[in-house]
Amino acid sequence: MRASLWLLIVLGATANAVTSFGGFHPLISVAFGSSTVLCTVLLVMHHLRHRRRRAPSGG
């Protein structure tokens, strides 16, 4: 799942940059940007749910 989200983030950011500077309709760029943000949020959520619990450090 993480690899898929990373791939979608990279592709979405690239497509967002291309559509931003390529003279496309602004809504297309907004759609790619929004999907990139969504994938980033999902990646963070996945990380937080699946991280290993660390023992508290004494000190």
Image (cartoon, rainbow, N blue to C red):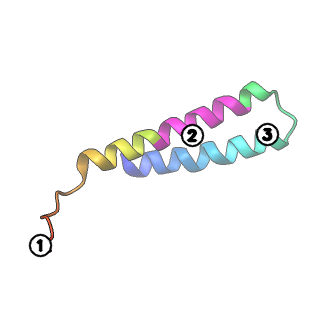
Q: Nearer the viewer, residue 42 or 55?
A: 55
Look at the numbered disc 1 and give the secondary structure of its residue: loop
Q: Residue furthest bottom?
A: 59
Q: Label 2 is placed on what type of residue?
A: Thr
Q: Residue furthest front?
A: 59
Relative image position of residue 44 (x, y in whole percent): 39, 46
**Dot 3 or dot 1, earlier in sequence:** 3
How many labels, in total? 3
**Dot 2 or dot 3, earlier in sequence:** 3
The label on residue 20 is: 3
CA distance for labels 3 and 1: 50 Å
The label on residue 58 is: 1
Task: Give the position of the N terminus as an image quadrant.
Answer: top left
Question: Magenta span covers which residues?
Answer: 29-40
Relative image position of residue 13 (x, y in whole percent): 64, 46
Relative image position of residue 54 (x, y in whole percent): 17, 62
Give the residue at x 14% y 64%: 56
CA distance for labels 2 and 1: 39 Å
**Dot 2 or dot 1, earlier in sequence:** 2
Give the residue at x 45% y 40%: 41
The label on residue 15 is: none
Q: Label 3 is placed on what type of residue?
A: Ser
Task: Give the position of the C terminus as an image quadrant.
Answer: bottom left
Q: Residues within 10 Å of mark 1 (few under 14, many from 20)?
A: few
Name the residue tied to disc 2. 36
Look at the numbered disc 2 and give the secondary structure of its residue: helix
Residue 10 forms part of the magenta stretch: no
Give the residue at x 79% y 40%: 20
Q: Nearer the viewer, residue 29 or 58?
A: 58
Relative image position of residue 27 (x, y in whole percent): 74, 25
